[in-house]
Image (tube, helix red, strand yellow):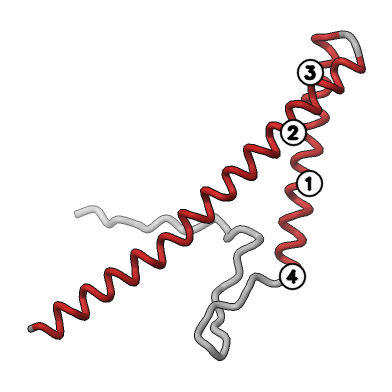
């Protein structure tokens, strides 16, 4: 019989993730300031790289610096709007999970107390 080996986890937690340490009220502590700052720096670096590549692509295609800058600016504004919408959707998803867990636990408690 073949033995199934578990694959070692090689992925690391995102930089903004901090292990939940509970404060006096039992609430998870917020992410450390340094982790949020590091995540912001990485995001800015990523966006700067994308902007450079988009400008190079637009400049080659249009052969005009001003038009290329306009195209890239429009694209970056659309990207920012998309990221804001995605962030609001993600917040809704993340905040719905505790509500689901609360309802599950309340259902289990009511079933156990009825037995």
Between the C-alphas of marks 1 and 3, the distance is 20 Å
Query: Please, what secondary structure does the residue beneath circle 1 have?
Result: helix
Between the C-alphas of marks 1 and 2, the distance is 14 Å
Is 51 on the left-hand or right-hand side of 84? right
Between residue 1 and residue 66, name the one nearer to us. 66
Q: Residue 61: give x, y in percent of width and height.
A: 80, 9
Q: Quarter holding the C terminus?
A: bottom left
Q: Residue at x 79, y 20 (%)?
A: 71
Question: Callout 3: 10 Å neighbours few (<14), some, many (20+)?
Answer: some
Q: Quarter holding the N terminus?
A: bottom left
Between residue 17 and residue 111, name the one nearer to us. 111
Question: Callout 4: 10 Å neighbours few (<14), some, many (20+)?
Answer: few
Q: Residue 91: give x, y in percent of width and height.
A: 53, 56
Please state the total of marks drawn on the protein image.
4
Q: Residue at x 79, y 35 (%)?
A: 49
Marks 2 and 4 close (CB-CB < 8 Å): no
**What residue is shown with label 1?**
44
Nearer the observer, disc 1 or disc 2? 2
Question: Callout 2: 10 Å neighbours few (<14), some, many (20+)?
Answer: few
Between residue 43 and residue 13, name the one nearer to us. 43
Q: Which numbered disc, 1 or 3, marks the residue that appears first in the sequence? A: 1
**What residue is shown with label 2?**
77
In the image, residue 79 sits, relative to residue 20, either above or below, namely above
**What residue is shown with label 4?**
33
Between the C-alphas of marks 2 and 3, the distance is 17 Å
Is 44 on the left-hand or right-hand side of 14? right
């Amino acid at each position: 019989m073949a033995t199934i080996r578990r694959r070692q986890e090689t992925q690391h937690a995102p930089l903004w993730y901090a292990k939940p340490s509970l404060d006096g009220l039992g609430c998870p502590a917020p992410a450390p300031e340094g982790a949020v700052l590091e995540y912001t720096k990485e995001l800015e670096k990523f966006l700067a790289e994308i902007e450079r590549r988009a400008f190079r692509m637009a400049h080659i295609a249009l052969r005009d610096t001003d038009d290329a800058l306009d195209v890239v600016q429009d694209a970056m504004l659309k990207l920012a709007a998309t990221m804001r919408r995605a962030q609001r959707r993600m917040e809704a998803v993340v905040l719905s999970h505790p509500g689901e867990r609360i309802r599950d636990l309340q259902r289990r408690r009511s079933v156990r107390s009825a037995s």
